[in-house]
Image (spheres, rainbow, N blue to C red):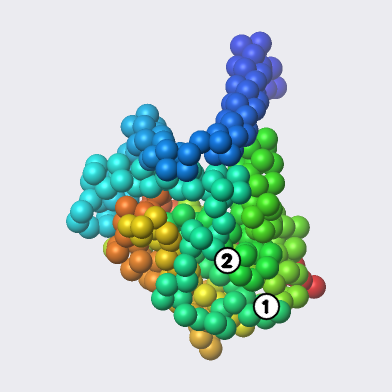
Amino acid sequence: MAPRPRGRGGAGRSRGRRLRNLLGDAALAAAIRVVLRGARHAPAGLWLALGRVAGAVTGRVLRGHRATALEGSLRVGPPSGGGLVDASFRHLGLSVAELSLLLAGRLDPGSLVEAGEAGCPEAFRRGVPTLWVSGHLGNWEVSAAWLASRVGPLHAVVAPLRLPGVDAVVGALRKRLGILPHPTTRAGVAAAVRALRAGGHLGILIDHRCRGRCAPVPFLGRAAPTPTAAARLAIRHAPRVFVAAAFREEDGRHRVRIARADPAPGESAAELTARWTAILDRWLRERPEQWVWVQPRWEGRRARRPAAPFAAGAAARGGR
């Protein structure tokens, strides 16, 4: 039988959905610009306090995201639960306020971040291919800006946002901080590999919800499907790898933690990913209030080869 044509109702709903997405995209992009304008003029202390309040309100309004964050907090161990989730959302709001002050020129990375125990002078040598691995810990955007101020342009593989207008605004803002984003497309990964092989510094967050080829690695006491693309890049192209994150201290400054974590001879991508994840796991347990994750991380999923281009073949061919 021939397929039944879509009725007018279905086409109307589709057009309505596209219109809502366009309006939402434009509204969020405009909101980002408003926040940046506010950061230029508001007293810094008041602005940071407003960020905490905005984060707390966001955590109460977005109930679905709050429920997912609560699931993650219960895996961290005590203290956990609603109080920890509230603290995480306050941290998120404060992180946005800090980033906006940085973009407004009211702060600079050197005044906001200190090396702390990172005493790894070899980590900041220019001209040596270096892969930086991290997760959504602390204020990851501010720590990336600090790293870019130390090593020159920091290339980063990032998943494009679903809203193209917001994605364009965020990409432009990252470039102002010395962060050069490359999308998780075949062309984007190839560009990142070329930058790495030319002696550049490349950053990747590995605690994403797995969309490509992944491996189940222990994370907060349970196997979590985790992307292995960064590990494959490291094994093929990066002689130096550092796991890093920056955490806010009581004085408001961020202290960077760095661990050298090069691939070992014969180590598989899954094993290397598990080793990196164990470092992030340990740091997260020490500062659980500075971890924000609002996507299902432990949902059941079998490891598979993806149709998406961010796969081993793309990584291997990117610089050739």
Query: Which residue is found at the position 49% from the left and 58% from the top?
Result: 112
Q: Which residue is drawn at 74% across and 64% down?
A: 190
Classify mark 2: helix, strand or loop. Answer: helix
> Most extreme residue toward the left, as rendered?
78
Q: In which quarter of the image is the N terminus?
A: top right
Q: Which of marks 2 and 1 is nearer the N terminus?
A: 1
| Position of residue 27 in the picture relative to residue 139 (left or right) | right
- Give yes or no for contact between labels 2 and 1 (Cβ–Cβ under 8 Å): no
Name the element at disc 1. Answer: loop
In this view of the protein, which residue sits in the foreground, 166 or 12? 166
Q: How many C-alpha atoms fall within 10 Å of the one at disc 1: few (<14), some, or many (≥20)? A: some
Horizontal and vertical percent for residue 78? 19, 56
Alpha-carbon span between mark 2 and mark 1:
12 Å
- Of residues 166 and 263, the one nearer the viewer is 166
Residue 71: % across, % down:
30, 47
Percent coordinates x, y for residue 162 in the rendering? 61, 39
Inspect this view and state whether residue 65 appears.
no
**Dot 2: few (<14), some (14–19), or many (≥20) neighbours within 10 Å?**
many
Query: Looking at the rendered structure, which numbered label has been put on residue 126?
Result: 1
Residue type (three-letter) at the residue carrying disc 1 = Arg
In-front residue for pair 26/122: 122
The residue that disc 2 covers is 147
**Residue type marked 2:** Leu
